[in-house]
Image (cartoon, coloured by chain):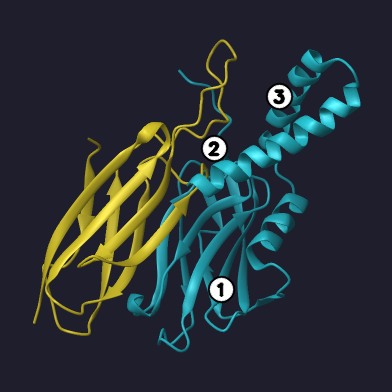
Chain colours: A yellow, B cyan
């Protein structure tokens, strides 16, 4: 299980725009590099990232090899109601990771 | 993801077919040649490839400069990690919002960097990530608005040490 860091404010006012920052540990091997004997290293990247807020998809990203190792993605959303914000990363070789955080909206 | 796989396969097949016809009857050698040419094609993107990528994103619509702000350092010592922020000037209401943000480059092995889909629930059209740059080049951010228009911003980033090229230790 890849280690993921997520930064979401624990509490927010209703209607407030909150910033969500995510970072997950992953090599993001681009598939363009060669090892010492000249053999190409196969691609191994995260290809998609999804964020849902109480089950509703609010953000989706398609990643390509040009994204750094340990992909960092930050975006915003409106705090509508208390609940769970869930994150899913999917990638090559069946890679899948999921995290979720709770938010209290007053 | 599945879509992208099929897309990749399709291009590979195209290249295979063209290389195969060049070689003529030699099917096995044709396959070998095709694999090499695919590898070469992937290892060098060009301004033309970027233009094609932008065309794939925007279709027939014209991409106008403005509304989008791409924030990147003008000079980067290490191409392995360059931070970028894309901000789009939009009220983000259900009637008028940013549907998608795309980032493409000119000289990376592939033009695509990231494609993001968002909606009025984002509140602001503001995303940040970190990207790899293989060389000094231009980076283009394109925003697709809910009214179907496309807007872009371009930055030139000078890279001292590019990504992708170093050997493994």
- Disc 3 versus disc 2: nearer the observer: 3
> Which residue does the image show at 50% across and 45% down from the upper left?
B2
Q: Are marks 2 and 1 on the same chain?
A: yes
Instruction: Tell me which corner region of the image, top left, top right, bottom left or bottom right, holds residue B148.
Output: bottom right
Question: Which structural element holds mark 1?
Answer: strand
The disc placed on residue B37 is none
Question: Which structural element holds mark 3?
Answer: helix
Q: Chain of mark 3?
A: B
Q: CA distance from mark 2 to mark 1?
A: 29 Å
Q: Chain of mark 1?
A: B
> Which residue does the image show at 36% across and 65% down from the upper left?
A59
Q: Are marks 1 and 3 on the same chain?
A: yes
Residue B167, x across and y down, in percent: 53, 22
Mark nearer the N terminus (1 vs 3): 3
Q: Residues within 10 Å of mark 2 (few under 14, many from 20)?
A: many
Q: Determine if residue B44 is in view.
A: no
Instruction: Tell me which corner region of the image, top left, top right, bottom left or bottom right, holds residue B7.
Output: top right
Q: Residues within 10 Å of mark 3 (few under 14, many from 20)?
A: some
Contact flag, marks 2 and 1 (Cβ < 8 Å): no
Q: CA distance from mark 1 to mark 3?
A: 35 Å
Q: Determine if residue A46 is in view.
A: yes
Q: Which residue is mark 2?
A: B163
Residue B106, x across and y down, in percent: 68, 51
Task: Indicate left or right for A94 with B87 as reference.
Answer: left
Q: Which residue is mark 1?
A: B144
Q: Which residue is mark 3?
A: B35
Residue B114, x across and y down, in percent: 50, 55
Residue B79 vertical position relative to residue B145 in the rendered view, above or below: above
């Amino acid at each position: 299980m890849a280690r993921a860091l997520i930064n979401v404010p624990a509490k927010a006012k209703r209607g407030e725009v909150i910033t969500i920052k995510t970072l997950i540990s992953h090599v993001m091997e681009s598939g363009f590099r060669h090892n010492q004997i000249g053999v190409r290293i196969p691609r191994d990247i995260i290809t998609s990232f999804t964020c849902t807020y109480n089950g509703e998809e609010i953000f989706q990203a398609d990643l390509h090899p040009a994204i750094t190792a340990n992909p960092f993605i930050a975006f915003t959303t409106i705090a509508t109601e208390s609940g769970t914000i869930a994150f899913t990363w999917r990638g090559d070789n069946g890679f899948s990771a999921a995290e979720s955080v709770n938010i209290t909206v007053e | 993801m599945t879509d992208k796989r099929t897309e990749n396969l399709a291009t590979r097949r195209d290249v295979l077919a063209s290389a195969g016809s060049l070689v003529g009857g030699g099917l096995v050698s044709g396959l070998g040649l095709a694999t090499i040419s695919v590898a070469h094609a992937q290892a060098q993107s060009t301004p033309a490839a970027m233009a094609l990528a932008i065309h794939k994103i925007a279709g027939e619509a014209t991409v106008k400069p403005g509304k989008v702000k791409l924030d990147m350092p003008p000079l980067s010592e290490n191409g392995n990690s360059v931070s970028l922020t894309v901000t789009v000037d939009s009220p983000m209401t259900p009637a008028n919002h940013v549907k998608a943000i795309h980032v493409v480059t000119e000289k990376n092995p592939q033009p695509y960097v990231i494609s993001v889909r968002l909606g009025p629930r984002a509140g602001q059209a503001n995303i940040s990530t970190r990207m790899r740059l293989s060389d000094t080049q231009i980076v283009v951010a394109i925003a697709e608005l809910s009214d179907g228009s496309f807007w872009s911003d371009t930055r030139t980033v000078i890279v001292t040490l590019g990504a992708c090229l170093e050997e493994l230790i």
